[in-house]
Image (cartoon, helix red, strand yellow):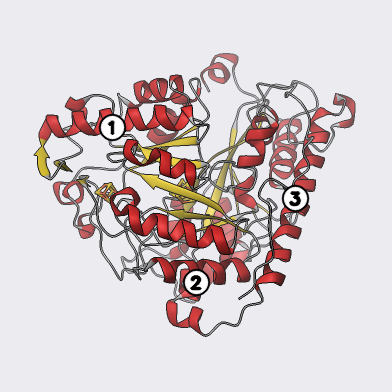
């Protein structure tokens, strides 16, 4: 196969995308991007995890080449062939590096939004370093436009930092759940270290030391580090603010606090012990509390180790090995499509940033209010299948993005998963209807914005206090959210006592 030459230093992305944000406190993803140097913006603006803005437009895939792990977490049980699950550690098909490269090329040919190959399991990528780096080498040779990304528990990170840098890997995630071995002893029953199994507090102390050392080494080499932390109520919930403060001080780029997934049927220690997961409010409150210290990721979908597609969609079933083998691919045309898409999205981002820098009187459709107005924050659910616009039918949505609109602008605060209402089967197996479950998932939201919605769900949502809105189909999400918020404001629906507003 011939692959066209691609120079990584020549980006399709414009280099001059505006200076420092003049609205530093507006809190939107676009404004955060405005505050970055050109060098860092180029690294993150087509990475769906490192940029909230990018996640509407770009896809990633995970190559499941790393079966072994060198530690045990109380929330992990790596199972295979569980296609209904979506959580880290779970895969359907374990790949060799050669198979992984072939699959990645097939995905990148079929999905032009594909910009990142991540290795995230099902075990630890750096406990399977040969397989991980063989995959990266193969892909760098055949599709050098695809960014390489790795997610590790950090135990063997320091010994691999130089190799990561040599492979031109610009994005590394370390899962850091604690910086205190006493907390760690409740999360990690053992680690495998220098050919010995070490347990309890001593194990946690070694792991923490390695994670912190690895973080410092990566930052010193200019590699962007995202820190993932699993929020475990009663174990590290009080402690994660301290984790956030420390990793920021050491130069981490982004902190991603994720909710513990612990169901008895997953067979994990926590699941079997009845350890509860945090509520959406607990997660948001902690993310808000950490936000003062550093950028927080709010759009993580806790992907499977073989996830494929935009965050929130799973197209893995389209790319099983037998299907990939049967595909005929024009790699040159595929690369051209990817580069064209990136150039278009970059131009779109640039136009959006230009609007943010426009004089206030011209910013009538921007997601920031044109002038400071007062009204309480409102949570809204949004149905979107990508591209940053409202383009999903209510009944086709498998998840809703949750935005908080307020006088400071529209802010993504998370997502809520739901079952497919239009699947023809209106029961969830436990007597609750799919619509009932969706309404429950949207608790706290006052509006749901979608491209279309049927009469029955419309009535049921309204009766539950969640007003459907199908007026903003194909509009940019943040603009639409703020338009609805302003409409609520002008119609007097947002008057709130000052004390309550301050608390919110
Ligand atoms: Fe994968 Fe992770 Fe790279 Fe992203 S995922 S290795 S940084 S390419 Fe992303 Fe998935 Fe959340 Fe991970 S949404 S689980 S943060
Ligand atoms: Fe599972 Fe990852 Fe923990 Fe290893 S590091 S036990 S693969 S969650």
Residue 4, horizontal then vertical, whole percent: 69, 66
Against 301, residue 504 (above or below) is above
Instruction: Confirm or deny contact between disc 1 and disc 3 (CB under 8 A).
Output: no
Disc 1 crowd rating (10 Å Cα; few below 14, some 14-19, many 20+) is some
Disc 2 crowd rating (10 Å Cα; few below 14, some 14-19, many 20+) is some
Disc 3 crowd rating (10 Å Cα; few below 14, some 14-19, many 20+) is some
Nearest to N terminus: mark 1 or mark 3: 3
Residue 8, horizontal then vertical, whole percent: 66, 49
* Image point (80%, 27%), residue name: 370
Dividing the image into 4 quarters, which one contains the N terminus? bottom right
Nearest to N terminus: mark 3 or mark 2: 3
**What residue is pinned by disc 3?**
12
Q: Residue placed farthest to the top in the image?
A: 499
Against 128, residue 454 (above or below) is below
**What residue is pinned by disc 1?**
210
Horizontal arrangement in the rendering, residue 158 relative to residue 117 (left or right): left
């Amino acid at each position: 196969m011939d692959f066209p030459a691609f120079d990584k230093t020549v980006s399709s992305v414009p280099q001059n995308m505006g200076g420092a944000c003049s609205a530093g406190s507006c809190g939107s993803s676009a404004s955060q991007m405005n505050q970055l140097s050109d060098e860092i913006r180029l690294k993150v603006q087509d990475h769906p995890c490192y940029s909230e803005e990018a996640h509407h437009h770009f896809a990633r895939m995970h190559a499941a080449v790393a079966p072994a792990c060198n530690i045990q977490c109380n929330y992990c049980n790596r199972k295979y062939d569980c296609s209904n699950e979506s959580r880290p550690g779970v895969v359907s098909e374990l790949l060799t590096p050669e198979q992984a490269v072939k699959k990645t090329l097939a995905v990148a040919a079929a999905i032009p939004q594909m910009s990142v190959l991540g290795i995230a399991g099902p075990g630890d990528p750096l406990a399977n370093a040969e397989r991980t780096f063989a995959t990266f080498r193969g892909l760098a040779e055949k599709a050098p436009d695809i960014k390489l990304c790795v997610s590790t528990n950090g135990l063997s990170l320091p010994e691999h930092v130089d190799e990561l840098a040599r492979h031109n890997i610009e994005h590394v995630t370390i899962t850091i759940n604690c910086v205190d071995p006493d907390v760690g002893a409740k999360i990690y029953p053992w680690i495998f270290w220098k050919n010995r199994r070490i347990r309890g507090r001593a194990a946690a102390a070694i792991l923490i030391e390695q994670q912190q050392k690895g973080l410092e080494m990566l930052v010193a080499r200019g590699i962007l580090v995202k820190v993932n932390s699993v929020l475990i109520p009663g174990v590290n919930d009080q402690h994660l603010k301290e984790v956030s403060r420390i990793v920021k001080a050491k130069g981490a780029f982004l902190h991603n606090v994720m909710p513990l997934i612990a169901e008895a049927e997953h067979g994990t220690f926590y699941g079997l012990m009845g350890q509860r997961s945090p509520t959406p409010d607990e997660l948001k409150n902690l993310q808000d509390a950490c936000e003062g210290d550093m950028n927080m990721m709010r759009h993580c979908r806790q992907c499977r180790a073989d996830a494929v597609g935009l965050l929130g969609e799973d197209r893995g079933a389209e790319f099983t090995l037998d299907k990939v083998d049967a595909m005929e691919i024009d790699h040159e045309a595929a690369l051209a499509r990817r580069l064209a898409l990136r150039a278009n999205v970059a131009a779109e981002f640039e136009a959006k940033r230009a609007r943010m820098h426009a004089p206030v009187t011209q910013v009538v459709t921007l997601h920031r209010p044109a002038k400071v107005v007062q009204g309480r924050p409102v949570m809204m659910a949004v149905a979107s299948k990508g591209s940053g616009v409202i383009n999903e039918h209510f009944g086709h949505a498998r998840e809703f993005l949750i935005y908080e609109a307020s006088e400071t602008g529209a802010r993504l605060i998370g997502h809520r998963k739901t079952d497919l209402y239009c699947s023809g089967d209106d029961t969830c197996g436990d007597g609750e209807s799919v619509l009932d479950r969706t309404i429950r998932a949207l608790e706290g939201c006052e509006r749901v914005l979608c491209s279309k919605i049927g009469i029955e769900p419309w009535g049921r949502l309204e009766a539950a206090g969640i007003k459907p809105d199908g007026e903003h189909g194909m509009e940019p999400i943040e603009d639409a959210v703020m338009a609805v918020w302003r409409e609520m404001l002008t119609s007097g629906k947002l008057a709130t006592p000052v004390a309550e507003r301050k608390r919110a």
